[in-house]
Image (cartoon, helix red, strand yellow):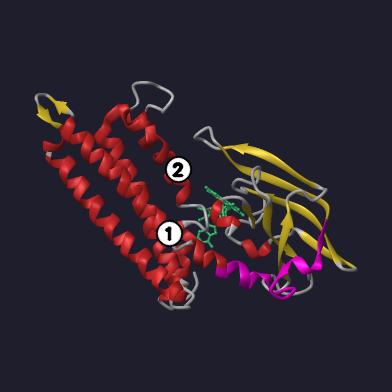
Amino acid sequence: PKVAKGEVQWCQGYSEPESGSDLASLSTRAIRDGDEFVINGTKIWTSMAHRADWIMLLARTDPDASKHRGISFFLVDMKSPGIEVRPIVNMAGKHEFNQIVFEDVRVPATNIVGDENRGWYVAVTLLDFERSGIDYSARARRLLDDTRAYASETIINGSPLIDIPWVQNDLVDRYVECEAARLIAYNVAYMQSSGLVPNREASISKVFGSETVHKATETCMNILGVYGSISSSDGRAIMEGRVQECWFASFSDTIAAGTSEIQRNIISSRGLGLPRG
Ligand SMILES: Cc1cc2nc3c(=O)[nH]c(=O)nc-3n(C[C@H](O)[C@H](O)[C@H](O)COP(=O)(O)OP(=O)(O)OC[C@H]3O[C@@H](n4cnc5c(N)ncnc54)[C@H](O)[C@@H]3O)c2cc1C
């Protein structure tokens, strides 16, 4: 398929300036006009919207229904008249985020996925897939492997850096966490391949995987010392500046696709049956 080949790119239009964790409070409106809907509103933090051909968009189609029940899931062509994409540069100096303004954007009614006003359930099922998170352990593992190789080759005060006990202890702890994150993600993939929809399992994978990446990048940063903080544009950077880059990105991993706090809420209520706080 074209998506797998990278020939068609999609972005995800869920978050809004006033609706993040409480996504169901979103206020982007879609009003029916014959065979079309007319969309007005603003999305934010939309990753790679500046490169996307299409957007998966949540919009409110019934403002009188309870907040989860009046939302529909639209597929919208990013070339539609009335869409303006405004870049947002993150703390690592990268342009990945965008704000998108929709002004009287017309979308065929046939572009709704599932039933009208039932889009919330499409979105949360997709989020459960997004939170599977096999990439977290893969990224952390690569960084740990490269840091281990660097520490083995680097001599500090006449001895290899890897000979220092805390370096070994920290690397071992991170490898253990990385392996656990990988197996937790495989469990989610197994459920998906068996036709089951993971829910608390996806949240467990998301929170553990993203926090594992963060701890791994911090350990690598400690081992590399100040050289770890040099960016790739400087010739003195170690490992092409990837530790610094991954360290910055690891903060956002614990926010994207639902924050760690929200994942813990899901595990608490849907996994453990604890009362909502
Ligand atoms: C790298 C990255 C990529 C992203 N890409 C996209 C994208 O492509 N499309 C898209 O739609 N969105 C995207 N987002 C946005 C992301 O989904 C939101 O940032 C996230 O859901 C949190 O919403 P918020 O930023 O509005 O924070 P808020 O909801 O305002 O939360 C602020 C703080 O309060 C805490 N909090 C809020 N409610 C609760 C609660 N009930 N219990 C405990 N703590 C709570 C949160 O955990 C957080 O620490 C992306 C974010 C990042 C970081």
Q: Nearer the viewer, residue 139 or 86?
A: 139
Q: Position of residue 153 (x, y in %)?
A: 17, 31
**Relative side of 271 to 28, left or right:** left
Looking at the image, is 91 positioned above or below residue 9?
above
State whether label 2 is within 8 Å of ligand 1. Answer: yes
Splitting the image into 4 quarters, where does residue 122 fall?
A: bottom right
Residue depicted at 44% across the width and 39% down the height: 248
Q: Which residue type carries mark 1? A: Gly
Sequence-earlier tag: 1 or 2: 1
Q: Residues within 10 Å of mark 2 (few under 14, many from 20)?
A: some
Name the residue tied to disc 2: 249
Contact (Cβ within 8 Å) of mark 1 with mark 2: no
**Could you give the CA–CA distance between mark 1 and mark 2, rounded to whole angstroms?**
15 Å
Farthest residue in the left direction?
158
Farthest residue in the right direction?
34
> How many numbered marks are there?
2
Q: Which residue type carries mark 2? A: Ala
Secondary structure state at the residue bearing disc 1: loop
Name the residue tied to disc 1: 133
Q: Nearer the viewer, residue 29 or 18?
A: 29
Looking at the image, is 63 positioned above or below residue 54?
below
Quadrant into which the N terminus falls:
bottom right
Q: Position of residue 172 (x, y in %)?
A: 19, 50
Q: What span is in magenta?
A: 106-125
